[in-house]
Every structure is written in structure tokens, then in C-alpha cells.
Amino acid sequence: MTIHSRTPVGLDGVVAAATALSHVDGDHGELVIAGARVGDLAGRVAFEDLTARLWSLARGENIGETEVRQRLGVARARTFERLPAILSAAEGLPIVAAFRAGVAALGPVMGLPDETVLVGAMPVIAAALVRRSRGEAPVAPHLTLGHAADTLRMLRGRPASEPETRALDAYLVTASDHGMNASTFTARVVASTQADPFMAVTAAYCALTGPLHGGAPGPVLDMLDAIGSRENIAAWVNAALERKERLMGFGHRIYRVRDPRADVLREAVATLERTGRDLGLAAEVEAYAREALKRAKPDRPLDTNVEFYTAILLDALGIPREAFTPIFATARAAGWTAHAMEQQRTGRLLRPGSAYVGDMPATSAAGRPGDEAKEPC
Ligand code: ACO
């Protein structure tokens, strides 16, 4: 069977939903979340504040930052109480897969909205898995700390510095929502069937894990490590492109210019006292890769995306690369839950069509290929 190049696939440009949550302008490199530019949010508002804004928009009723902050603290504590049961299915799995099992084990908690349970649980599960991989016991959450501060504290077993907390908070805000990306679309598809938010978020996480989406930052760090020195940049990048490999942290389905989140996170990295990495080398790799991509794909603008500086930032915060995708999920869960709520309020099932390019039975009354009107469900 041939998928012809003229067959429309990939849903490029298809509008799947109307949303008040976020907007991506790929031609001008602009991301608006809950009515504000990402550059005006990161470092200025806390993750709890942005989450409150997203949930308020999705629900159509006002939810305050203080309420969200308090409830997330309670949700982290409740998750910790159930941690042995939540992690029992994750035994022996690598962190990215174990996190999936942990999220899948979540369910309603008396007195807490489902979206709060989900967002609150993410860093508790991620931190426990990181510590388990090091043979360390999990650290109980702190009820009144902010989400970013408590995430780092649970990971490390000791409080993080102010600049580190601010940098992670900036990341959580920056990565909280991003239009109809693959994982958010997945959340909306599941929610559109009227399945509950636990189903929608578990499915969304699965979509996030792939290297073309939220699985990219680990490989970005692998690339920087493999390059290692300035002398090696050109040879490594050129060889990768000659092998037709994709450079991780570059290119985007929507952006035709630089991803605005890359600059926001680069600035967040710059606020840290220590990064443990040669930032000059990383900047030279970025610059060379952008030029090499221009030469290799002159007709397709490929620029730096969010994952390049995500990798550098999370690494600088001491988060192991195996946990980058769960930490991404910790941020994006705000958007997933909001989109699931917004989608359910529409009451509309998401069910796109497909272009049939296979054979038709000789006796079919359906007519021509491409007509799927007779599909049973
Ligand atoms: N490195 C090298 N070549 C690339 C890259 C890249 N990073 N990105 C795209 N290309 C090439 C494709 O191979 C394709 O080449 P071809 O025409 O010879 O087959 C051409 O550019 C056009 O690519 P598209 O198909 O239009 O790109 P698409 O919209 O499908 O891909 C994607 C977007 C998946 C992000 C892609 O750029 C990529 O794989 N990047 C690397 C992985 C990455 O950084 N992922 C994180 C994205 S951000 C996020 O999801 C949070």
C-alpha cells in the first residue's frame, strides 16, 4: 500500500478545537498562555498562579492562586501517603515508563478536584522514582511550600536555593501549555469521549514520551556530551545530518522562527550561579546546528526549540536526564487538565477522518477510495 505524498496526513493546519487556554503563532514566534505572552509570565508569576488562570478559563469560574497553592500541597501529601501502592506497578521499570505506571495508578481523592490530584501527584511520583533509582527513600512533601520549591526539595532531600527555585518555577510556567501539541491533543481526544481526567492525563503522558515531542531533552544532553569540545562541533553535527538524523532540540511543526520558550529558558539558565556545564560550548553547538540546518534544509526553516534549553536548565538543577520527561509532565499537567475540562464542556466527540488509500472490494457500494462514510464507528 502506498501513502501518496499528496495524501494529507499529520493533521497540519487542522483546527481540532477552540481554546481560550493558549495560542501559538508559529510565523512570529509568539506563545500566549491564558492571555499573556510567555516572556511576561515566566519568572514573574508562579506555577500555581498560571495553573489557577488555566483552570479558571477551562471551568468558566474563578479559582484563586491561594486556593490552588493550598490544594496542590494537600494533593502532594495525599499522593505521598499512597506512594507504595502507586509505585508497586512501577517496580523494575526505567523512570519514564515507571512514571507512566505511577500516573496510571492515580484516582479520585475525597475532597480534592481531580485536576488538583493529578497536578499535585506529578512531582511526588517523579521525585520518588529518581530517589528509588539511587537507592534512596522518598522524601515527604511540604504542605505549604510552592510546587517548584517542593519538587526540588523532594528530589534532593534538602531545600533548593532561591535562584534554583525561581528557575524551575520559570520552567514549569513556560512548559505549562502550548496549543494543540500532540500530548494535549491526546488529552482532548480522550476527554472528548467523556472519559475521566485520569484517563486523559495518562494517555497524554504516553504521547509526551516520544523523542519527537517531550522525550527530546535527554537526547539533547546526550548530543552535547557526545560533542564534548568546540573542535568536535562541526564534525559531529555534519555527520549526524549526513546520516539523516534529526538534531534534537531543533525544528518544530508550528514555529517557522525561533521557539520563544528557548529564549525564556536560556535567560532562566543565566540566573543560576552554577550550571555544571560549559554554556559557551552549548551556545556554539546551537549556533552551528542552526547554520548547518539552514544549509541542509534551505526550504524548511528549522530553529532552536524549547527542548534545547530545557535540557540545559534541568541538568543544571541536578535533575537526571532520565527524569526530564516526568518533569516536563509536571509542568504540562496544568495544561492537560485544563484542556480536558475545556473539551468536556463542549460535549463534542473528537473523531477526525482518514484518507483511505487501500483496495476496495469489487462489490462495495462505497464508491471511490477516500470515502469513509461507511466506516462502522
Ligand atoms: N534535524 C534535522 N532535520 C530535521 C529536523 C531536525 N531537528 N526537524 C525536521 N527535520 C527535517 C525532516 O527530516 C524533514 O526532512 P525531509 O523533508 O528530508 O524528510 C524536514 O526537515 C521537514 O520536517 P517536517 O516533517 O516538516 O518536520 P515536522 O513538523 O514533522 O517535525 C519535529 C517537527 C518533530 C519537532 C522535528 O523538527 C524534529 O524531529 N525535531 C527534533 C526532535 C525535537 O527537538 N523534538 C522536540 C519538539 S518541541 C516539543 O515537542 C515540546
Image (cartoon, grey):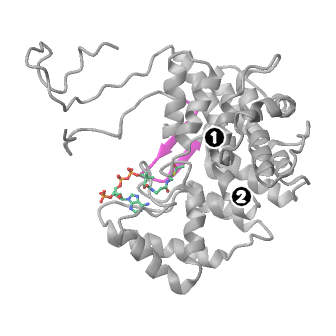
Residue 338 visible within the image: yes
Percent across and percent down for residue 217 are 59, 57
Above/below status of 32 relative to 307: above
Callout 1: few (<14), some (14-19), or many (20+) C-alpha neighbours within 10 Å? many
Residue in the image at 56% along x and 38% along y: 206
Sequence-wise first label, 1 or 2: 2
* Label 1 sits on residue: 332
Residue 179 visible within the image: no
Q: Which residues are magenta?
A: 20-32
* Label 2 sits on residue: 320
Whether label 1 touches label 2, CB < 8 Å: no
Tell me which amino acid carries mark 1: Arg
Percent across and percent down for residue 186 are 50, 32
For residue 311, side relative to residue 52 (left or right): left
Q: Quadrant of residue 350?
A: top left
Residue in the image at 64% along x and 20% along y: 60
Q: Quadrant of residue 121?
A: top right
Percent across and percent down for residue 330 are 69, 42
Above/below status of 347 relative to 20: above
C-alpha distance separating marks 1 and 2: 19 Å
